[in-house]
Image (cartoon, grey):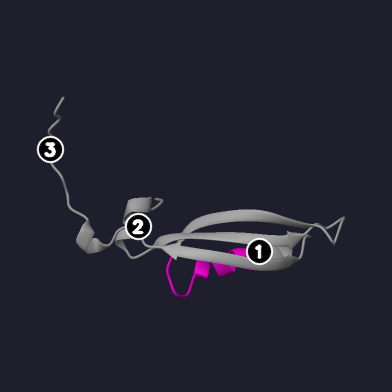
Amino acid sequence: MEISETELMLKGYGLTTAEFIYHMPDHPHVLNTFLWQDYDLAPDHDRMFRFIEFWHQEIDGPLHSVRFTHRKMIGAGEWRHVKGEFRIH
């Protein structure tokens, strides 16, 4: 069973966004970008580093640089279970 994004956030995961700048395989002087997002744990960023390893093994375009940011969306203290909802028209 796959864990939902909300469960990951409650376990301390945050959204990591990385911009990969890489050389085009057929035109090595041309740079291109690829954006990647996933829920990851800071400061280790295991999922991002696994993706970078995958890139080195499977993708022909060598990496030029990687920029990333990490943001925790919610924490365990910010979550509350709501049993009802009131709508005001």
Q: What kind of residue is marked 2? A: Met
Q: Which residue is mark 1?
A: 54
What are the residue bounds of the magenta stretch?
40-53
Q: Residue at x 52, y 55 (%)?
A: 37
- Return the x and y of residue 47 as percentages of the image width and height: 52, 65
- Return the x and y of residue 34 as percentages of the image width and height: 65, 54
Q: Secondary structure at mark 2?
A: loop
- Return the x and y of residue 2 as percentages of the image width and height: 41, 51
Above or below, comparing residue 38 to residue 50 in the picture: above
Quadrant of image for the C terminus: top left
Disc on the earlier residue, 3 or 2: 2
In front: mark 3 or mark 2? 2
In front: mark 3 or mark 1? 3
Q: CA distance from mark 3 to mark 1?
A: 45 Å
Q: CA distance from mark 2 to mark 1?
A: 27 Å
Q: Residue furthest top?
A: 89
Residue 86 as seen in the image, left or right of residue 58: left
- Return the x and y of residue 83 as percentages of the image width and height: 13, 41
Mark 2: few, some, or many residues within 10 Å (few <14, many ≥20)?
some
Q: Residue at x 72, y 67 (%)?
A: 64
Q: Which residue is mark 3?
A: 84
Q: Are marks 2 and 1 in contact (CB under 8 Å)?
A: no
Mark 1: few, some, or many residues within 10 Å (few <14, many ≥20)?
few
Q: Is residue 1 magenta?
A: no
Q: Secondary structure at mark 3?
A: loop
**Which of the labelled discs sits on residue 73, or is there none?**
2
Q: Is residue 43 magenta?
A: yes
Mark 3: few, some, or many residues within 10 Å (few <14, many ≥20)?
few
Q: What kind of residue is marked 3? A: Gly
Q: Residue at x 17, y 49 (%)?
A: 81
